[in-house]
Image (cartoon, rainbow, N blue to C red):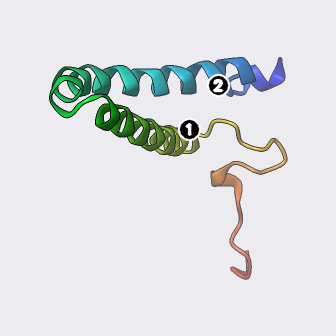
Amino acid sequence: MEEASAGRLGFKSQVAVVLAFYVGLFFIEYPPIFLLGYWSWGAFAHKALTGVLLAVNLVITERAAKRLGLFRDSREPPQGDRRQEGSGA
């Protein structure tokens, strides 16, 4: 419970946030691709483009999770607590 009171989300909450972000990206981009691509380019091109965009979404989601500070190692100190080595302080 101390971890939750410190402002960090639990593992299930972190997974829910990342999953919502990933699915949200998919539903933002998929309808236009389906309406334009599937009928004019054919099924193969549509599936290939969808696969590429799913991979891009994974990269975007991973960067967003890192930026939000999700799934950090508990042994790693927070960014603000790191001290500069050799600074003499």
Question: Residue shown at 30%/32% (left/top)?
Answer: 46
Dot 1: element: helix
Q: Please name the residue shown 73% across and 76% down the image.
A: 85
Name the quadrant of the C terminus.
Answer: bottom right
Eyeballing the image, is 58 above or below 36?
Answer: below
**How many dots with numbers?**
2
Q: What residue type is labelled 1?
A: Ala
Q: Are the residues flagged by discs 2 and 1 in contact, CB closer than 8 Å? A: yes
Q: Which of the pair 41/70 is nearer the observer?
A: 41
* Residue at the image point whose x is 82% and y is 23% from the top: 2
> Residue 35's x, y, as percent?
19, 20
Asked if one can make out residue 23 in the rendered structure from this viewpoint, the answer is yes
Q: Where residue 25 sits: x, y (%)?
A: 38, 27
- Picture residue at 18% right of the left edge, 23% below the top: 39
Residue 5 visible in rendering:
no
Q: Disc 2 versus disc 1: distance between alpha carbons?
A: 9 Å
Q: Position of residue 12 (x, y in %)?
A: 71, 18
Q: In this view, does 36 lie to the left or right of 78?
A: left
**Residue 28 occupies which quadrant of the picture?**
top left
Q: Name the residue under label 2.
A: 14
Q: Looking at this view, is 35 or 20 the one in front?
A: 35
Q: Name the residue under label 1.
A: 65
Quadrant in the picture for the N terminus = top right
Q: Which of 23 and 75 is in front in this view?
A: 23
x and y percentages locating residue 84 in the rendered image: 68, 72
Q: Mark 1 or mark 2, which is nearer the start of the sequence?
A: 2
Q: Is mark 2 on a helix, strand or loop?
A: helix
Mark 1 burial class by Cα count in 10 Å: few <14, some 14-19, many 20+: some
